[in-house]
Amino acid sequence: MNDSQTDPANSNPSLAFQSRVATSVNSLQRMNEKTESLLSDTDSSKREIWRIRVKEQGAEVTSLVASLERFVSKEHKRAVEQMEREELLQRRNRTRGEDALNVGVVRERESLQRSHAQMDDNISIAEAVLNNIMSQGQSLRGANDKIYSVAESLGLSSTMLNWIARRDWEDSWLIILMIIFSVIIMSLIWWFLA
């Protein structure tokens, strides 16, 4: 059997490199520890020089370990970003297909159905308001007729009756203008929301 098939580190060049560097750093640490243990067997005159060199070597090994950890972290982050990028591209390509078109059509149909239902509700509310206004107008006309008959029986002057009639006419135009204004406002709201 081929070594590249049995060793997963060989299947990915980055993982193979990381494992070789980690092995080398571990062997350097072991050699540094071994050298430090052998210091007690050397001459006392050379022992201090070798102790300084071993400490420098240990610092370099520590620095290498830190660099290796940063490298592994960056590689892992890069691999995760690459996987996420590929997943996003696959999702993007998948949503561009027919499924996305069907989902869009379904969403559009549902939106239209909701809009139609809202418009039907608005129309029924407007009809109810209009019926109420018409019944109030009939009630007011009846009250107006009663007021005129009472005013005539009390003997109010004709100028006062003309003033009341003019005020009644102005009020009716004011109501008509308010109705038109309300219809315009509702139309604008519907237009902006639709």
Image (cartoon, rainbow, N blue to C red):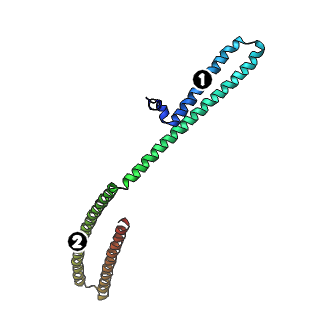
**Which amino acid does the dot numbered 1 rest on?**
Ser
**Residue 97 occupies which quadrant of the picture?**
bottom left
Q: Residues within 10 Å of mark 1 (few under 14, many from 20)?
A: few
Quadrant where the image shows the N terminus: top left
Q: Residue furthest bottom?
A: 158
**Residue 45 occupies which quadrant of the picture?**
top right
Q: Residues within 10 Å of mark 2 (few under 14, many from 20)?
A: few
Quadrant where the image shows the C terminus: bottom left
Measured as percent of width and height from the top left, residue 28 is found at 62, 24
Above or below, 42 relative to 123: above
Observer-nearest residue: 23 or 138? Answer: 23
Measured as percent of width and height from the top left, residue 123 is found at 26, 68
Write down the residue under mark 1. Answer: 27
Observer-nearest residue: 40 or 108? Answer: 40
Above or below, 37 relative to 99: above
Mark 1 secondary-structure assignment = helix
Q: Residue furthest right?
A: 45
Measured as percent of width and height from the top left, residue 72 is found at 54, 35
Observer-nearest residue: 30 or 129? Answer: 30
**Which amino acid does the dot numbered 2 rest on?**
Asn
| Horizontal side of residue 61 vs 131, given as left or right | right
Residue at 60 percent across and 23 percent down: it is 27
Mark whose residue sits in front, 1 or 2: 1
Write down the residue under mark 2. Answer: 131
| Horizontal side of residue 27 vs 76, given as left or right | right
Residue at 74 percent across and 15 percent down: it is 47
Compare marks 1 and 2 and give the one earlier in the sequence: 1
**Residue 74 occupies which quadrant of the picture?**
top right
Residue 70 image label: none
Mark 2 secondary-structure assignment = helix
